[in-house]
Amino acid sequence: MSTSTRLRTPLIVMFGVIMAMVAFAAPANAASYANQTTTSVNKQIATAGSHVVFCGEGFLQGETVNISLGNGTTYPSVVAHGPSGKFCTVIVLGVSLTGHQTLTATGATSGRTSSTTIQVLGVSANAAPIPASSGLAFTGANAIGIGGLGGLLLIGGGAMVLVARRRKVNA
């Protein structure tokens, strides 16, 4: 068996693995930017009784934007300005508020909504912040898929080495 024939099979297998990886890679289904509303705050972790600056964009120009908190608290409405429909307002958090809270902006005319989650730390008697809940921070890494792919590639490579050794012994 010639050298080119022995190399052809592992190359075909490697090409097949690459094609499978490309086939399973799917594009992200993002909404069109023209209708996308976004909101943000100046700090993700705040103390009860303090304030955050809540901003958003993607609403209609001149539209009234209603602002609410996930627990049912409503805040004064603001008006979106400019062609990009931007707004910014100061939100004062209640002194008894703790835990993860969701601030939501809803356009009164368009019905567009966007939400941002913040964590509110409680305040003890000596005014030191107390975490509302303990837990590990989410870093955004999901190693299961990457590790699985790496394992499959190692197994495939080992199989190609074994096949190549067998062919060499039989030749």
Image: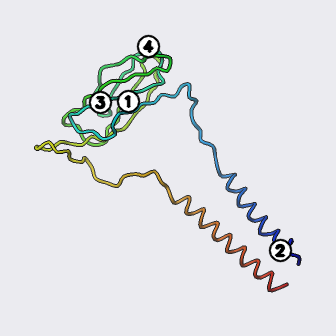
Q: Which residue type does callout 2 highlight?
A: Arg
Q: Where is residue 149 in the image (x, y as percent from the top left)?
A: 60, 62
Q: In this view, does 97 lie to the left or right of 106?
A: left
Q: Distance between the residues labelled 3 and 4?
A: 25 Å
State yes or no: discs 2 and 1 in contact (Cβ < 8 Å). no
Q: Position of residue 85 (x, y in %)?
A: 46, 20
Tag 1 residue: 104
Q: Which residue type does callout 3 highlight?
A: Gly
Q: Residue at x 57, y 36 (%)?
A: 30
Q: Position of residue 170 (x, y in %)?
A: 82, 85
Is tag 3's residue or tag 4's residue first in the polypeptide sequence? 4
Is tag 2's residue or tag 3's residue first in the polypeptide sequence? 2
Q: Distance between the residues labelled 2 and 3?
A: 70 Å
Q: Which residue type does callout 4 highlight?
A: Gly
Tell which tag, 2 or 1, sits nearer the viewer.
2
The disc label shown at residue 6, or none: 2
Q: What element carries label 3?
A: loop
Is tag 3's residue or tag 1's residue first in the polypeptide sequence? 3
Tell which tag, 3 or 1, sits nearer the viewer.
1
Q: Position of residue 122 (x, y in %)?
A: 21, 42
Tell which tag, 1 or 4, sits nearer the viewer.
4
The disc label shown at residue 75, or none: none
Tag 3 residue: 72
Tag 4 residue: 62
Q: Is residue 143 above or below residue 106?
A: below
- Near-viewer residue (73 or 9): 9
State yes or no: discs 3 and 1 in contact (Cβ < 8 Å). no
